[in-house]
Image (cartoon, rainbow, N blue to C red):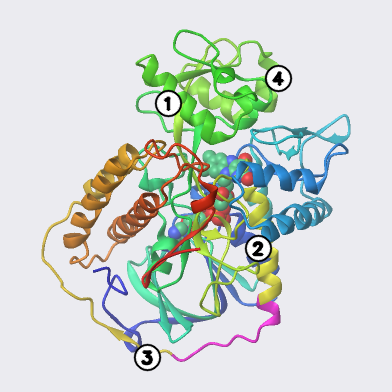
Amino acid sequence: MIPEYLISFNTSQLNKEKVDFLIIGGGLSGLYIAWELRNYDTLILYKDGLEETCSYNAQGGIAVALSKEDTPQLHKEDTLKVGCYLNDEKAVDILVNEGIERIKEIIDMGFNFDKENGDFHFTKEGGHSKKRILHSNGDAIGKSITGFFYKLVSNIPNIKILNNSFLIDLISVDDKIVGALILDGNKNEIFLIQAKGYILATGGAGMVFQETTNPSHITGDGIAVAYRKNVELIDLEFYQFHPTTFYIAGAPRFLISESVRGEGGILRNVYGDRFMYDYHPSGELAPRDIVSRAIIDQMKKTNSNCVYLDLTHLKKEFIKKRFPQIYNFCKTYGIEPSKNLIPVRPAAHYFMGGIKTDLWGRTNFSNLFACGECAWTGIHGANRLASNSLLECLVFGKRIGIKIKEENFKIYDVDVKYVFPKKADIWIDKEDLKRSIRSLMWRNVGIERDEEGLKYALSKLKEWQKYAFCKEFYDKSGFESLNMLIVASLITESALIRKETRGTHFRKDYPEIDDKNWKKHIIISKKGVEIK
Ligand SMILES: Cc1cc2nc3c(=O)[nH]c(=O)nc-3n(C[C@H](O)[C@H](O)[C@H](O)COP(=O)(O)OP(=O)(O)OC[C@H]3O[C@@H](n4cnc5c(N)ncnc54)[C@H](O)[C@@H]3O)c2cc1C
């Protein structure tokens, strides 16, 4: 029912542009790979611009075992424990060891992490046994590190950056990707890019859930494009919900970073009671899935729509210096964190599953790579250890750069015509479709799941697919709504298959971890489902 491409096209009639490498997405993974490929003609696409990436909005920092009391082995153990041992150990070894090299490299390149008394200042976040999070400009690692690489790549003549351009689909012939269909939002024109290699760096899919920390452009496009091309996707049932996002009606779900709890923030329910030690011995610094579920439980028990983060025992000057973005954001909405409690509740945050890659970022197409949040490298397992994702962008971005330079890719001639099947002249309110997907997913495929809710969600999504995929859209919002429909369906299908609770995937009807039957991955592609 899902077509191979979202639009009809004839490549012989499209304007064409040739580059060595096309990087779709300019968050940290896209920018870093571009830097690695700086000796080639490289094009980076942004759906909108830098500020709309998750990378730019990252707050807490980057996890790296660089402090005197830490070791890569401890970092590895924490990553595996939080991931409920569904991680690929080889990938985790690469992350924790090569991560140290990458961080040292960027420090040598001139990137500044925050220091205290001349030494790097490490902070702690949930699930970490040691203080190992390096941060920058207080709570602005995202702005700092993307700004750093954006500036570097902008000054390289071979690297071109195109804002406001949308990847609609990748065109394949046999086992090669031969072109990319792009909507140029500035001219409202569809054109073709031919490259030797293609890198999907399109981020996660937070927008398929009603409550999310992700910018509004993060709609899972790269994952949906990959699915249409029969690329294997894996572990899609694992979506991390961040426990503490700012919650007052009408305000954005602004993230209140975990490092706020790392620096002493206390969670209280509506009656002012501290509750996290009733759920986990690590209290506020328990893994994110446990904190999120505890908050939901407290909201239910106290019949309220949020809980509160209490920083009132911390000094105003400390909060302002350590968390300038968070402090200023709360102030905008009349909350002074050193005096007032901050209302918070969970929201969809990070996609552990994604496009299946090997340890060099390769997919099952020889010239198609995936990196960052849209990719599955195996490092996160069933739950991501806080602040491991920016490190992943650097570590696996570097590996993709190395692999691409070793290969002898070439540009292929392309002569493909495609006619979109079953055109229908029905009117579809795209924004309503998106809203409906998001609320359905939040209610039935969110923090707590069960068979009944998942089956209901899947049946609705399939029903909506029946007519939505008869409609040939020609605009970004239309393409996004169809991509969201695909990704939401695949997450739900995977969540229905996994009959156990593991990491972020909490099944009320199967509340225990089941290593005997389920220490396995669910791989989904157009060919079907494989469990192994
Ligand atoms: C609020 C927030 C705070 C976070 N804090 C931290 C933290 O402190 N530490 C940490 O390690 N991680 C953190 N994370 C997670 C981390 O930021 C992300 O996992 C990581 O930045 C993902 O990088 P990326 O390059 O894969 O994707 P992104 O940075 O999300 O970039 C995706 C890019 O793809 C482009 N794109 C998408 N679809 C298309 C399309 N169809 N056509 C063209 N372009 C497209 C977008 O425009 C964008 O440029 C945080 C996330 C959020 C949302």
Identify which amino acid the numbered label 2 is placed on.
Answer: Gly
Residue at image coords 18%, 61%: 466
- In primary-sequence order, the first of circles 4 and 3 is 4
Secondary structure beneath label 2: helix
> Is residue 68 depicted above or below 102 in this figure?
above
Extreme residue toward the front, this view: 516
Front of the two marks 4 and 2: 2
- Asked if residue 169 is positioned above or below residue 133 in the image, the reply reads below
Q: How many marks?
A: 4
In three-dimensional space, the C-alpha distance between marks 1 and 4, rounded to whole angstroms, equals 30 Å
Secondary structure of residue under mark 3: loop
For the residues labelled 1 and 3, the Cα–Cα distance comes to 53 Å
Q: Which label belongs to residue 296?
A: 1
360 up-or-down from 68: above or below: below
Amino acid beneath label 1: Ile
The residue carrying mark 4 is 318
Reading the image, the residue beneath label 2 is: 397
Residue at 23% across / 69% down in the picture? 1
**Foreground mark, 1 or 2?**
1
Residue 507, x across and y down, in percent: 40, 40
Q: Nearer the viewer, mark 1 or mark 4?
A: 1
> Within 10 Å of the Cα at label 2, are there few (<14), some (14-19), or many (20+) other Cα atoms?
many
Whether the residue carrying mark 1 lies under 8 Å from ligand 1 is answered with no
Question: Which span of residues is magenta-colored?
Answer: 404-413
Check contact, mark 4 vs mark 3: CB within 8 A: no
Q: Amino acid at mark 4?
A: Phe
Q: Does the segment drawn in magenta span residue 406?
A: yes
